[in-house]
Image (spheres, rainbow, N blue to C red):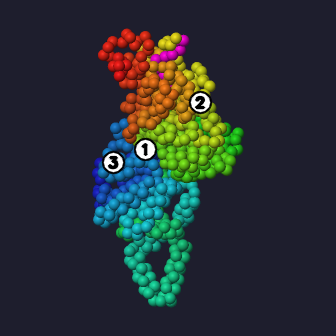
Amino acid sequence: MTLLESIEGPEDLKGLDAAAMAQLAEEIRAFLITHVSATGGHLGPNLGVVELTLAVHRVFSSPKDSIVFDTGHQSYVHKLLTGRQDFSTLRQQGGLAGYPSRVESQHDIVESSHASSSLSWADGISRGYALTGQQDRHAVAVIGDGALTGGMAWEAVNNIASDRHRKVVIVVNDNGRSYAPTVGGFANHLKELQASVQQGVDAMRTDRRYEQTLEKARQLLSGSGHLGQAVYRGLHGMKQGIKDVVVQQGIFEDLGMKYVGPVDGHDQQAMEQALSNARNYGGPVIVHAITEKGHGYLPARLDENDQFHSVPIIDPATGKPEGTSTARTWTHVFRDEIARIADEREDVVGVTGAMLIPMGLQKMQAAHPERVVDVGIAEQHALTMAAGMAFSGLHPVVGLYATFLNRGFDQLLMDVALHRAGVTVVLDRAGVTGPDGPSHHGMWDLALLQIVPGLHLAAPRDEATMVEELREAVAVDDAPTVVRYPKGAVGQPLPALERFDDGVDVLARNGEGTGADGRDRDVLLVGVGAMCTTALEVSERLAAHGVSSTVLDPRWVLPVAESVVDTAAAHRIVVVIEDGVRSGGIGSLIRQKMRARGVDTALNEVGLPTEFLDHASRDQILQRTGVTAQRIAQDTLASVLGTKVPYARPVADDAAAAPRGTAAETRRQD
């Protein structure tokens, strides 16, 4: 049995000596490299927090003390120390989640993997402990310097600092990166702090006797008339001046919080001492730890892009991906086309939130570095800033993962849309993303965006329509436009048979029509974006059963095109297939437009349930939720036959012939 295998919970760490702790750290890194390379996952961030996490669990007592990981992708070490050492199915269906999970362990608190929220959690938890008399419990937040670029973190710091007796310890894991190197003024401030060495000073300043002595001096001198008050002000000013020169904690002290650091995050004893000082202080303290992403694994350290932030299956010896797909992805298409557009138009600027390479803006940046802005993890700021850019004559293209649009919805609504700003938002990873789990599925955007007045939303089905619709989007200068696409390979071209005057594409007409002109068909299948492939397969399956169908790609799903409603009127039933939530999705919007026009054709919305979907592959999730060609074809066939709600509208010749008592007849009688 290895030392790691003997660790069943955090309490097992308490009695280990320094040599054993060093051995344990080595074993954890070897474990992570071996297992994460076999499954894929967040490798670099976890290699960088081994000693830091060990120190947190040695000094604090989880779950009595609440440990919150910001984002949570760096919680693998925490999982190993809290009884979860089966990583064989990491991020796979039924296996270990890639982020903290309350289902897995009482040691996990925050499941959301959106950045910058941990300090608000710590504020709430610590307030709760204080109000309920649980004075012996601490709230510990582990947050990266990248996450501190998010405004929500500073809103929380402002509140935490208002109570000098709140038992909150904020561990800043400063590796200089989020996905990419951390940007902004705060990042520069942290770099300045890294140059200072102040361990002995920290031990003194986090001793309550230090504060008590200062308070007594203040009371004594302040009560000694004008001379005493002048002396106190002079001494206090001198103290601040010395601190600013010797201990450059600056911004933290100005907010009213104690600052400890910077500490070498890979020095086990130094980390434990710093955290012990912070715990014993009894008030809010920031512990600034300097770490290296990918520490102890040379391939990760040498990776300039993101130091193995997230890896596919790799060779653990070399770090090289195994069986890497050469298929062209949606991100590749956007990367190349936005670079071409930027070459042609000087007013186009790119905006990203700490995801330059994942979003595909690196090619544009290489050619036009002054026209690509990385705002850090600050989606709210990105969208309002984009509105300001549009006002000044530019056309911003804001690149976000679809799941992170949620964070900037108010700004999109009130700053961009209300002011009719010509801003294009590009949403990568829309729909089901797979192994990252419920917080990363981009399944909410279609329902959210349809309520934004004046917004235009495109969902391309293949590479050609992606290029076409992106160019159409950036041509709009008086309203927000959105282009959304899924994760992964872009797939085969899906040419259109015909394009209506309002831009809607007809992809297929299968089976014989039922109308007088032979064109009307039983089923209208409307595919949203990448789901057009599924719609075409459903059409083929229906044709094999003698059911005729038409397949439409609206291209621009917002607003609903008139030709979609016109075509719906000529069919017995409409089936809308989308990879967002059914509730409030595109299907429900098309139904509303049909009713407003007096079109009573039945409509079935096929999409995702309104629930948080556990991690699994994209295909497994679609299978589990019934969004597959086989299942959709079966349900649609049942609707056409009148055995399943919604019932297809009967054709005229069937009205008299249908047997009484059938579902179709019952519906007609109603």
Q: CA distance from mark 3 to mark 1?
A: 14 Å
Badge 2 or badge 3: first in the primary sequence: 3
The magenta segment: 517-526
Give whichever of 518, 483 is nearer the camera: 518
Judging from the image, what secondary structure is the residue with disc 1 in? loop
Badge 1 or badge 2: first in the primary sequence: 1
Tell me which residue sits at (44%, 54%) in the image: 117
Contact between marks 3 and 1 (CB within 8 A): the answer is no
Label 1 Cα crowd, 10 Å radius (few <14 / some 14-19 / many 20+) = some
Q: CA distance from mark 2 to mark 3?
A: 42 Å
Q: Where residue 432 sits: x, y (%)? A: 45, 36
Does residue 61 belong to the magenta stretch? no
Name the amino acid type tagged 2: Thr
Give whichever of 399, 367 is nearer the camera: 399
Seen in the picture, residue 176 relative to 646 is either above or below; the reply is: below
Tell me which residue sits at (48%, 67%) in the image: 255
Badge 3 or badge 1: first in the primary sequence: 3
Q: Where residue 309 sits: x, y (%)? A: 49, 47
User: Which residue is label 3 attached to?
Assistant: 102
User: Which residue is label 2 attached to?
Assistant: 465
- Asked if residue 23 shows in the view, the reply is no
Residue 439, labelled with which disc? 1
Judging from the image, what secondary structure is the residue with disc 2 in? helix
